[in-house]
Image (tube, rainbow, N blue to C red):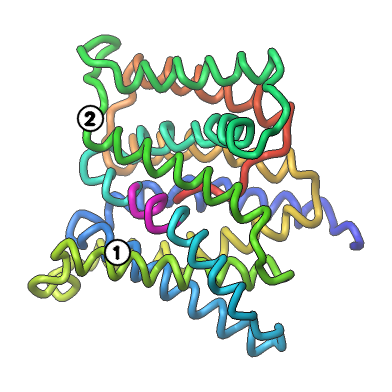
Amino acid sequence: MHKPPTWKIAAALAVVYVIWGSTYLAIRIGVETIPPLLMAGVRQTAAGLLLYAWLRGRGVARPERVHWRSAAIVGALMLLVGNGGVCWAEKYVPSGLTALLVATMPLWMVLLEWLWHGAARPSARIVCGLTLGFVGTGLLVAPGRFGGGSHVDPKGALALFAATVAWAAGSLYSRRARLPKSALLSAAMEMTAGGGLLLVASALLGEWRGPALATASARSVGAMVFLIVFGSMVAYSAYMWLMKVTTPARASTNAYINPIVAVVLGWWVAGEPVTARIAVAAGVIIVGVILIISHRPPPPAEIA
């Protein structure tokens, strides 16, 4: 593929940095008045169907049945448990802290790839990165008050733990699953399947009782529209394009830029506190992630 101009790569990176970093705040605003799994289900289903229709209209080949089965498994892990868990957790955990905990996903990728797929034993550098990542996470979830702030709500922390592990597992599965050659078509199918599962889970949990969307505030609806158009379509497309035209290491720098954007936006827009505990934990986690990503193939797109 012909290498595109540097300004196009820089613009795409800026899109991924800013938009994906802002999705955590958008999720928090959305779940203020919209049930979390319902919002996630509408977001992913709408984005998936729109992207699928656009790709088919451009002549992309129809996927096979086995492709849909693989997409459903990936969607269940990455979107039902992963993105759904993040949306539910943001009822209890500030958006900036959520982004910091999600930033530990490369740690789980390393461990699962080693334990599940028999990858090479982690090197000393990766072990150092893993250790720093878990130390930073421990600072955020440890009980007690120090550094000017309290610890993360345990319910939210547990949900984010499950979401991050499921996202890493789904990512590893997707690398070996039978999916269409078109990465965008695969993404559209995964969003459609995962979004459908989120809507079913939302109904089973009783989120559809009463006028769930009819009583949503304009602020929450606007956040959901932002997530559909920009979070699930524009930013993801930009990320997939970057994976083709630049180095994986450069494309994956979002793994440690997005949390910084999320923390700053949470503080600036939503008044979320940035305490010494958060600042120290953020630095420790981000350094750990940098050590891992700079030494191995990067993780795929983030949960938000």
Q: In the picture, residue 200 is in which quadrant?
A: bottom left
Where residue 39 is drawn, which disc sits there? Answer: 1
Residue in view at x 48 percent, y 47 percent: 167
Q: Position of residue 211 (x, y in %)?
A: 11, 75
Q: Quadrant of the N terminus?
A: bottom right
**Above or below, 170 relative to 54:** above
Residue 255 magenta-highlighted: no
Residue in view at x 44 percent, y 49 percent: 22
In terms of sequence position, does the residue under pointer 1 or pointer 2 come before the other? 1
Overall secondary structure of the magenta stretch?
Answer: helix
Amino acid type of the residue that numbered disc 1 sits on in the rendered structure: Met
Q: Position of residue 177 (x, y in %)?
A: 64, 60
Whether residue 256 is visible, yes or no, is: no
Amino acid type of the residue that numbered disc 2 sits on in the rendered structure: Pro
Q: In the picture, residue 140 is in which quadrant?
A: top left
Q: Position of residue 281 (x, y in %)?
A: 42, 19
Marks counted in the figure total 2
Instruction: Identify the secondary structure beneath mark 2.
Output: helix
Q: Position of residue 132 (x, y in %)?
A: 53, 16
What residue is disc 2 on? 154
Where residue 244 is drawn, which disc sits there? Answer: none
Write the start and end of the magenta stretch as one range: 79-85
Inter-mark Cα distance, 1 to 2: 23 Å
Instruction: Identify the secondary structure beneath mark 1.
Output: helix
Between 93 and 12, the one lying in front of the other is 93
Between 15 and 114, the one lying in front of the other is 114
Query: In screen coordinates, is 200 left or right of 75?
Result: left
**Above or below, 175 relative to 98:** below
Query: In screen coordinates, is 286 left or right of 227?
Result: right
**Above or below, 246 relative to 67:** above
Residue in view at x 20 percent, y 54 percent: 32
